[in-house]
Image (cartoon, rainbow, N blue to C red):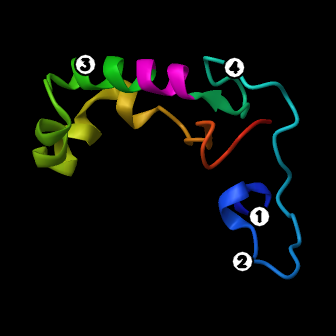
């Protein structure tokens, strides 16, 4: 994906795309490997922080990994896909 980003211009001579990719539209909610919008990813992050009892990023960063592993939803969140932020990843 970074080879398609405007920020990668001039950094690559050639690229081989492997392991598939996302060919669906950008969505606010990540569904089955679709690229999520910045708005959707931020909303997901706020819900995650609230569930963990954190009021800030600093509080999340200070939590021990064990706290994350004890949360059943955090342990089953699956993979995180790239976010279409309009800066690094411009579109699907």
Residue annotated with mark 1: 3
Neighbour tally class for label 2: few under 14, some 14-19, many 20 plus, Cα within 10 Å: few
| Image position, residue 3 (x, y; %) | 77, 64
Distance in Å between CA atoms under marks 1 and 3: 35 Å
- The tag earlier along the polypeptide, 1 or 3, is 1
Neighbour tally class for label 3: few under 14, some 14-19, many 20 plus, Cα within 10 Å: few
Label 4 vs label 1, nearer the camera: 1
Whether residues under marks 1 and 2 lie with C-beta atoms below 8 angstroms apart, the answer is yes
Residue farthest to the bottom, as pictured = 13
Residue annotated with mark 4: 27
Distance in Å between CA atoms under marks 1 and 2: 8 Å
Residue at horizontal 25 percent and vertical 18 percent from the top: 51
Residue annotated with mark 3: 51
Magenta segment boundaries in residue numbering: 38-43
Residue annotated with mark 2: 11
Whether residues under marks 4 and 1 lie with C-beta atoms below 8 angstroms apart, the answer is no
Q: Is residue 40 left or right of residue 21?
A: left
- The tag earlier along the polypeptide, 2 or 4, is 2
| Image position, residue 66 (x, y; %) | 19, 46
Using the image, determine if residue 2 lies above or below residue 77.
below
Label 1 vs label 2, nearer the camera: 2
Q: Secondary structure at mark 3?
A: helix
């Amino acid at each position: 994906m970074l080879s398609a980003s405007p920020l990668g211009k001039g950094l690559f001579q050639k690229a081989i795309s492997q392991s598939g990719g996302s060919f669906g539209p950008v969505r606010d909610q990540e569904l089955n490997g679709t690229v999520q919008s910045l708005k959707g990813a931020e909303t997901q992050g706020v819900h995650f922080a609230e569930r963990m009892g954190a009021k800030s990023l600093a509080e999340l960063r200070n939590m021990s990994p064990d706290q994350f592993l004890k949360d059943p939803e955090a342990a089953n969140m699956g993979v995180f896909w790239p976010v279409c932020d309009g800066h690094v990843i411009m579109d699907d």
